Image (cartoon, grey):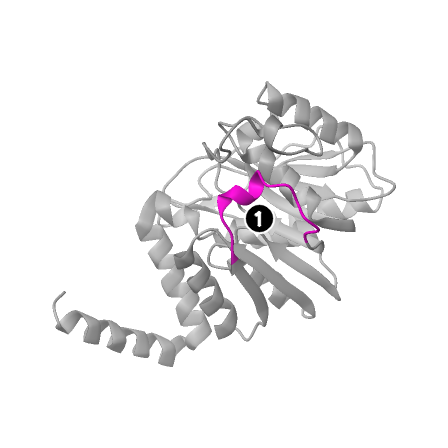
Amino acid sequence: MDAKIPSELVEFADVAVDELGGAAAFRTLLDRFAMLEGKRGGEFYTPPSIVRVLVEALAAEAPGTIYDPCCGSGEILLTAALQTPGLAVHGDGLNAEALTLARMNLALHGIDSRLGRQSIDVLSRPGNGDSSYSYIVANPPFGLRGWSREDPALERSWLYGPPPRGNADFAWLQFVLERLAPGGRAAVVMPAGAAFRGGRERVIRQAMVADGCIESVIALPPMLFYNTAIGATIWVLRRSSNPQRELLLVDATGLGRLSQRAQRELSEQDHEVIRAVLTDWRAGVTPPPTRRCPPPS
């Protein structure tokens, strides 16, 4: 590497810190880095619009514990901790690089946390008295293949049935539910296909609906992620002794506007619409079933 480059980077970082402050400068550089990394950037960074929907759907209250099993660079935990002071913050990273970023991100914002590293093998291992958490948030890698060394049905027992070996989405959902404390709530990002795929996933999904552990599913608009138009959903899960026998389906696919960098972002009004629907639902108010969002622009 050219000897001038490191000194120029340090000088640039110093200017950014002077103008923005250390925490804001770090988040700005992280956002830029994730965008330049393209698809790989999505492995460790969740865009702000998605983070906010996750955290607001969680509606966490202190005191309590919040956990992210694949915390990336820690932006979801950070947003939750800043919004709800007094939460005990826990998380695990799936690789050392992302875990380092998460520790820096939280420390620069003055957030105490307990972060560790875990292998993807954790999905197929039986739980051995694992800790339980009041709140769980996660944006796991979509459609992960080969996450289990053999047929998941042979490796351990599952709450709602063994997921397919070729896709870890429903392994993540059950992993989260296993670690959710009674009365707790989780918000997990899932690909749109998780809501309608067949086979083993259909069996698991039916069992989850019948058990009342799915509070709502929020369908997000496309192009919220960096450098991909893939759509996503947020599954809001509950562990309750008196679960609801209905679940709320929120169609937010028509919300958001394209920013200058050809990425969709949710406005303050968009966030308020989603938050109001969830708040009303939890208060026992059923939204009109025919209400539709405007088409994407």
**Front-lying residue, 263 or 4:** 4
- Above or below — where is 78 with respect to 3? above
- Above or below — where is 196 with respect to 65? above
- Above or below — where is 115 with respect to 72? below
* Quadrant position of residue 197: top right
**Front-lying residue, 158 or 67:** 158
Residue 50 sits inside the magenta stretch:
no
What residue span does the magenta drawing correspond to?
117-130
In the orientation shown, which residue stands out farthest toward the right?
242
Q: Residue at x 68, y 66 (%)?
A: 87
Q: Position of residue 199 (x, y in %)?
A: 59, 18
Q: Position of residue 217 (x, y in %)?
A: 66, 36
Q: Residue at x 73, y 45 (%)?
A: 278
Residue 122 sits inside the magenta stretch:
yes
Residue type beneath disc 1 = Ala
Q: Position of residue 144 (x, y in %)?
A: 47, 35
Name the image quarter holding the N terminus: bottom left
* Quadrant position of residue 10: bottom left
Residue matched to label 1: 138
* Quadrant position of residue 14: bottom left
**Front-lying residue, 230 or 264:** 230
Q: Is residue 10 left or right of residue 218?
A: left
Q: Position of residue 27 (x, y in %)?
A: 43, 65
The answer to whether residue 228 is visible is yes
Q: Residue at x 64, y 32 (%)?
A: 292
Q: Secondary structure at mark 1?
A: strand
